[in-house]
Amino acid sequence: MSLETQAFSVALSQKAQSLKPSSTLAVTARALELKRQGVDVVSMAAGEPDFDTPQHIKDAAIAAMQSGKTKYTPVQGVPELREAIRAKLMRENGLDYSLEQISVSTGGKQALFNAFLAFLDAGDEVIIPAPFWVSYPEMVAFAGGIPVFVDTLASENYALDPEKLAAAVTPRTKAILLNSPANPTGVVYSEEVIRRVVEIAVQHNLLVVTDEMYEHIIYDQNKHVSAAKFGMDNVLTINGASKAYAMTGWRIGYAAGPLHLVKAMNAIQGQSTSNPNSIAQWAAVAAITDSYDYIAMARGKFQERRDRIVAGLNALGLPTPLPDGAFYVMADTTSIHPDEFEAARVILDQAKVAVVPGTDFHAPGRVRLSYATSMEQIEKALERIGTLR
Ligand SMILES: Cc1ncc(COP(=O)(O)O)c(C=O)c1O
């Protein structure tokens, strides 16, 4: 048989077949495709700050390249970066970790992935408040675990009732996932709620995985509280540079937690991607050490935009709760179409505004709009969505 006539198609693994592609990325790709065709699309889909990476961070990357910091580093990151993270966790969060308890990865995504692979066995359950960031259940399932959802309601501003979490604990529960400030709801949990969740974890011998990616994007009187404050042995803290310092493309995230867990995560990373990008690590040292001017500027701008978009959507008859943090709003689009997927399609095809349907976030009847874009784009989006009313 000649090579040309051989028809072979490798069977994909069960794992690959059951993995759902990220719907956020799918919508962003569709909007980009429309843009490429010359259609003027306003994108409210992407989950990244529109600001450029601050100059002092870029300068640190350039200096790293020029001084030859372009080789393999320790798998868990250079000591200088882990020291910057250790000092940050102490200074900003009141957490006392050792350098060995800190591991740097290729984005918060990889830190989370490493974690689930390191502590989940087949059938282990992870409790996740819903609506949730789309990647959590996929990552848990990929690692063999079972995501268990506890609903929170838009009518209650997505407040989390820890007793509902406690009621979801079974003999197979291994962990509880917290994300505050949250994607997509923007909810920020109070100190009392977080303390109670850690208490429940301690009581049932569970791990709390706390994703604190949006900690600096927080509004009004809300305060970010790190769960690890209430029980270092039961908490794995995840954070990163993407959202805090406008560094989504640099791919730096990190985990801090119990030593044996962090060591297992390092071993997993060591056999997969090894160290995160060396130049980005040195840039992250500058970012984490001092970006307070940037953080204050970004927070101010995000807050103005949040206020405008929430007021605008509510005025258009699309009920939208006021988020406490992050840079997303969840608009009720049932008056456009009862099904959120169809509503998102109508908004993209007719109003030329890209939004993400709430389906994969477990937010039926709602779409997510990211306001990490300029005020002009927000005004344009509101005007265009207004034409559908
Ligand atoms: C809640 C949450 N966690 C983690 C991440 C991952 O961020 P990165 O991998 O860019 O660090 C994101 C990105 O969208 C997110 O929204």
Image (cartoon, grey):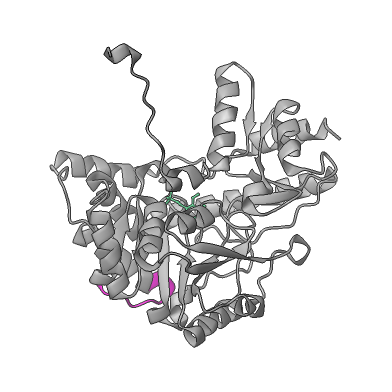
Image coords of residue 33 (percent x, y): 56, 23
Q: Decide which of 389, 324 is in the foreground and name it.
A: 389
Q: Is residue 92 magenta?
A: yes
The answer to whether residue 204 is left or right of residue 156 is left
The outermost residue toward the front is: 1
Residue extent of the magenta highlight: 91-98
Q: Which residue sits at x=26%, y=74%?
A: 98
**Residue 108 vertical position relative to residue 146 in the rendered view, above or below:** above
Q: Quadrant of the N terminus?
A: top left
Image coords of residue 192 (percent x, y): 60, 81
The quadrant in which residue 76 appears is bottom left
**Residue 288 vertical position relative to residue 90 in the rendered view, above or below:** above
Q: Which residue sits at x=23%, y=51%?
A: 274
The quadrant in which residue 338 appears is top right
Q: Is residue 142 magenta?
A: no
**Residue 5 vertical position relative to residue 189 in the rendered view, above or below:** above
